[in-house]
Amino acid sequence: EPEVTQTPSHQVTQMGQEVILRCVPISNHLYFYWYRQILGQKVEFLVSFYNNEISEKSEIFDDQFSVERPDGSNFTLKIRSTKLEDSAMYFCASKWTAGNEKLFFGSGTQLSVL
Amino acid sequence: AQKVTQAQTEISVVEKEDVTLDCVYETRDTTYYLFWYKQPPSGELVFLIRRNSFDEQNEISGRYSWNFQKSTSSFNFTITASQVVDSAVYFCALSEGWQTGANNLFFGTGTRLTVIP
C-alpha cells in the first residue's frame, strides 16, 4: 500500500532555531495536512493545504509556522524560531479527494526543542 | 463547535477478554463522519474505520466491531478476544460537513489499551 513518508524520524534542535520537517505525501493525493501530538496528549490539527495554498489553519499555526509544497512531491512544515513547547510528534497526512475520506498518516517526526 | 470525548484514558484487559472503547461526539452538522485510528507503540496512526452520519448500521471486521448510535452521539469500538498485538492507543475522530473541502479531522484524547498476556 502507498505510504506517506516523513523525514527525519527524530529531530533535536535548540530553542530559537529554525526547523524544517519534510513529508512526501502519496503521489496522487491532492490534500495535505500537518498535525501534532504533544507527548501523551491528543492529535491536534495544524494546517490543511490544497491547490498550493492553505485551506484552513488552527490557532496553533501562528506566524512562526509555514508550509510549502516546493515541488510535485514534497510538503514541508517550517518552524521559524522554535520554542520549548513546540516539542511534539508532528504527523503529515494526505488524501486524494475532497470531503471526508480517510487520511493517510506518515510515521511522524519527533521534534525535541532543548 | 465539534468535540470528541474518550472518557477512558487507560484500559487493561487480560488476553482473550472482550473490551469496548467508548467515544462520544458533539457536532452541529447533520453531515459528518466518524473514524477510529490505532496508534501502536511504534507511533504511526493506522486507519481502522470510517462511518458517515447517515449510516447507523453496526459494522464488524474480524475481531473488531463498531456500534454507532446517533441518539446518544456515540461511536463505540469493541475488540473481541483481545490479543497482545491490540495494545495501542486508540483515537476516535470526527470530520464535519459535506464533501467539499479539506474536512479536517478532530481527534479525541485517545484510550490506551493494554492487553496482558
Image (tube, coloured by chain):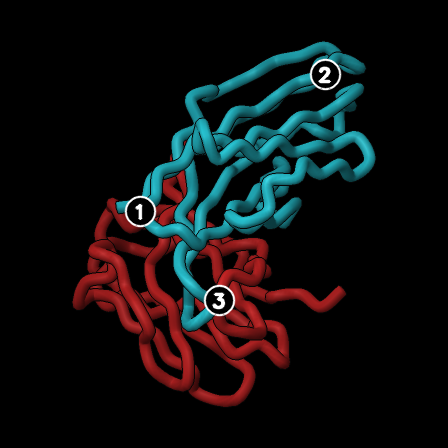
Foreground mark, 2 or 3, reads 3
Q: Could you tell me if residue A3 is visible in this image?
A: yes
Which residue is more in the foreground, A21 or B82? B82
Q: Secondary structure at mark 2?
A: loop
In the image, taking residue A26 as reference, residue A56 lies left or right, namely: left
Location of residue B55 with respect to A48 vertically, above or below: above
Sequence-wise first label, 1 or 2: 2
Residue A104 lies left or right of residue B116; in this view the side is left
Q: Position of residue A75 (x, y in %)?
A: 46, 76
| Residue to which mark 1 is pinned | B28
The amino acid type of the residue labelled 3 equals: Gly
Which mark lies nearer to you, 1 or 2?
A: 1
Q: Colour of chain A?
A: red
Position in image of residue A27 (x %, y %): 63, 79
* Image spot of residue B104 (x, y percent): 41, 59
Q: Tell me if residue A111 can be seen.
A: no
Q: Chain of mark 1?
A: B
At x 55%, y 68%, the residue is A95
The residue singled out by tag 2 in the image is: B18
